[in-house]
Image: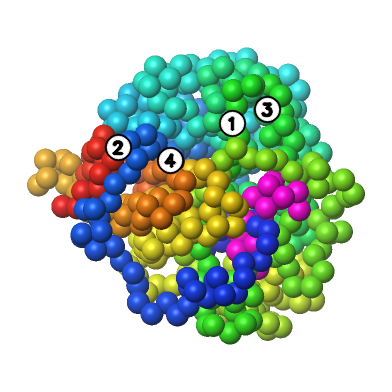
Amino acid sequence: MNRRKFLTNSLAAAGSAIIPPAALASTTFPPESLPQSSPPQIEAARFPNDFLWGMATASYQVEGAWNLDGKDESIWDRYAHGVGHIKGGDTGDTACDHYHLFKQDIALLKRLNQKSYRFSISWPRIQPTGTGAPNQKGLDHYKRVMDSVLEAGIRPFCTLYHWDLPQALEDRGGWPNRDLAGYFADYAAILANELGDRITVWAPFNMPWAFTYYGYGIGIHPPNRANFGDFLKALHTVSLAQGESFRAIKAASSKATVGSAYSMAPGYPKTNSEADIAATARYHAMNNTFFLHAALKGEYPNAFVGEPPYDRMGVKPGDDKIMRAPLDWVGFHYYTRRIISDAGGAKSSSASHFGTEIEVDSGDTNGRDPYTRFHAVMPSEGPLTHAGLEVYPRGIYDLVMQISREFNHPAIEITECGCCYMDTPYEKAGGNIPDLRRTQFFAGILSELARAIHDGAKVRAFHAWSLMDNFEWTDGYSQRYGLTWVDFRDQKRIVKDSGLWYSNLAATNKLQLPA
Ligand code: FCB
């Protein structure tokens, strides 16, 4: 995804209590120097013996087979088939053809010593129009995939929704339509009934703040709507759906554990002014912990200046009980950080505030946010990846410790972490792919994660994004996040040097200096 999109992207929502300014200030300001991991810190890093090393993918990004075996159109099919939406005119029609090649891809996971595979199920494969009887061919497909994963001795981690909404449900109003909470719970019940013997680890939504905001708030993802009122309604429907699906899964499968796959990026106040510190707390509540707070506490965190817009969100009496879901564990992604400042009453301008995630434009509620009033910007003090994201290893430590403190030390899974670099097979390296920057990225971040575990955080899993290069949303195939290189002309896979390094880590639980 491009820089602008990612800026909005890897921020998730939710949160509860405002973090006391003192706590924020102590970990965040001033950002004197960029803390990077030193070689001794990397070499000393150790992970528990039972740590779950994993890799992640998502249905639309890897499966292809967009109209096979009864699957109907998703909003991403519709959007990618439209002109002018995706770089290069790319689509996910074939992607990595994982639908047909899953056996070899799972064998690869095993060869790379992986213990956990995070994947998502395509809703329109299971219920082609989003409601009603399940499509047997779709269910059979995922049963075969799960059998391969289990035979490989790998734990399946299932995300129910990684953005590919059945188009038919968008035609009925999409996520702003409260009815979708019930439809989603029905879908969850089908999955848990049919696959609950094979899958025990479930996360309802990938990055709920991001897909509601991008899709309905600013319209840079399908369904391409830029309407702040729709975004507010979508937030609430998804929160209700999270609670409803939690109960549906638990009712259908006694073995099920349910958690999350939120996007989070630690926020650091731009200055130590009270206004910036308060804006950082609002940012954290909106983008990082909105849905987590809703689930664990049955209420929304205070992400807003003044009265929360509960009417516009469509909140009804009794919804607190529906939203509430005592998650068994907490999962979130880490890619980069944000610097936050108070937006005051300033008029917004996307040109002059490049990187602002939710902008102020009072008087214009169409796609602009008069409620949260912060600017979130991605700094560039550290090195940038090819997606333009700043590499900031220290951020994962701060984030994991902050979530641990705020939510009473839950079991944590890192559901995604990765970087885009465009290295290709190199003849002089025997056709291998020397992608040292990716290895350095993981070494730095993982040494900081080891430090968080050492300091008491209960982190039990880490999923690298991604098993292989894939369809990177509106950036199509122009961004490569894989630990395995994919030739999209013939579906050849070549493990990158970073993938070999990561497989060694998965076998030893010890970091090695990147070489
Ligand atoms: C995350 C998404 C994932 C992928 C990575 C690069 O935000 O969950 O699908 O696009 O970013």
Identify whether 202 is placed above or below 147: below
Which region is colored magenta? 282-299
Q: Is residue 296 magenta?
A: yes
- Inter-mark Cα distance, 4 to 1: 14 Å
**Residue at left offset 12%, top offset 45%:** 429
- Name the amino acid type tagged 4: Ala
Q: Is residue 446 left or right of residue 457?
A: left
Along the viewing direction, whichever of 92 and 105 lies nearer the viewer: 105
- Farthest residue, direction right: 317
Q: Which residue is labeled 3 in the image?
A: 250
Mark 1 Cβ inside 8 Å of ligand 1:
no
State the predominant SS element of the stretch in magenta: helix
Of callouts 1 and 3, the N-terminal one: 3
| Residue behind mark 1 | 257
For mark 4, give the secondary structure: strand
Contact, mark 2 vs mark 4 (Cβ under 8 Å):
no
Q: Secondary structure at mark 2?
A: helix
Q: CA distance from mark 3 to mark 2?
A: 31 Å
Could you say which is closer to the camera, residue 88 or residue 188?
A: 188
Numbered badge on residue 493: none
Q: Which residue is mark 2?
A: 506
On the image, the x and y values in percent for residue 56 come to: 44, 39
Kindly identify the amino acid type of the residue bearing the numbered disc 3: Lys
| Residue 159 at least partly seen | yes
Q: Which residue is mark 4?
A: 461
Q: Give the image location of residue 20, x and y in percent.
A: 62, 70
